[in-house]
Image: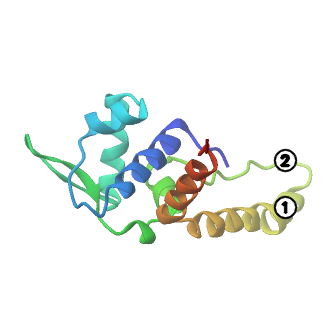
C-alpha cells in the first residue's frame, strides 16, 4: 500500500476541517492552503474528490467554503484515502503466471487479500477524532514549564 501526496494532503486538510467542525463555520481552500502550506490548486483537486465522496459540503460565493459533511468521529482514515487515492489497494501482479500459476492464486488467497483486508480494517478503525486527540497529545508533550 502506498499513500500518495494527495492522500496525505487530503488527510491533513480533513483534520483541519475536523478541528473547526464544532464552530459550524466554512473554511476556504485558501485558508487551508495557508495554514498547511499546501498548494491551493492541488487542494482544489483533493476537495473535488472529497466532495464527490460525500465527506465535505461546499458553499460557493464570497462567504463560501468547505465543512465536514459528517461529524469527525464518523470519518475514518479509510474513508478519506478511498476518496482521494486512485489505487488504494493495488492488485499484486503475478510472480509466476506461466510456470506456477497455482502459486500466484495461493499467494493471493493466503497473503495479499488478507493483508489488504487488515489494512482496510485498521484504517477504518482510525477516525478524525482519533487524529485530533493525537495532535492534542503531541502538543501537550511539547509544553515546557519554567
Residue 31 lies in what quarter of the image? top left
Residue 122 lies in what quarter of the image? bottom right
- Residue at 83%, 57% (x, y): give it: 104
Given residues 138 and 122, the one toward you in this image is 138
Q: Are marks 1 and 2 in contact (CB under 8 Å)?
A: yes
Residue 32, image x, y percentages: 33, 39
Point out the tag, 1 or 2, that comes first from the N-terminus. Answer: 2
Given residues 100 and 57, the one toward you in this image is 57
Which label was assigned to residue 29? Answer: none
Q: Residue furthest front?
A: 146
- Residue at 62%, 65% (x, y): give it: 120
Q: How many marks?
A: 2
Q: Residues within 10 Å of mark 2 (few under 14, many from 20)?
A: few
SS of the residue at dot 2?
loop
Query: For this view, does 120 lie left or right of residue 13?
Result: right
Q: Tell me how the rendering is colored.
A: rainbow
Residue 121 lies in what quarter of the image? bottom right
Residue 39, image x, y percentages: 38, 28
The C terminus lies in quadrant: top right
- Residue at mark 1 to residue at mark 2: CA–CA distance: 9 Å
SS of the residue at dot 1?
helix
- Residue at 31%, 60% (x, y): give it: 21
Instruction: Name the residue tied to disc 2.
Output: 95
Residue 140, image x, y percentages: 58, 52
Instruction: Name the residue tied to disc 1.
Output: 107
Given residues 136 and 13, the one toward you in this image is 136
Q: Residues within 10 Å of mark 1 (few under 14, many from 20)?
A: some
Residue 80, image x, y percentages: 46, 56
- Residue at 26%, 34% (x, y): give it: 30
Amino acid at each position: 500500500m502506498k499513500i500518495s501526496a494527495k492522500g496525505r494532503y487530503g488527510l491533513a486538510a480533513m483534520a483541519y476541517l475536523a478541528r473547526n467542525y464544532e464552530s459550524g463555520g466554512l473554511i476556504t481552500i485558501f485558508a487551508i492552503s495557508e495554514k498547511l502550506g499546501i498548494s491551493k490548486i492541488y487542494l482544489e483537486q483533493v476537495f473535488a474528490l472529497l466532495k464527490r465522496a460525500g465527506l465535505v459540503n461546499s458553499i460557493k460565493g464570497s462567504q463560501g467554503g468547505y465543512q465536514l459533511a459528517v461529524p469527525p468521529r464518523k470519518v475514518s482514515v479509510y474513508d478519506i484515502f478511498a476518496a482521494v487515492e486512485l489505487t488504494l489497494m493495488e492488485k499484486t501482479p503475478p510472480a509466476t503466471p506461466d510456470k506456477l500459476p497455482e502459486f500466484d492464486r495461493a499467494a493471493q488467497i493466503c497473503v495479499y487479500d488478507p493483508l489488504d483486508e487488515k489494512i482496510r480494517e485498521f484504517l477504518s478503525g482510525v477516525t478524525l477524532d482519533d487524529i485530533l486527540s493525537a495532535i492534542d497529545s503531541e502538543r501537550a508533550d511539547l509544553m515546557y514549564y519554567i
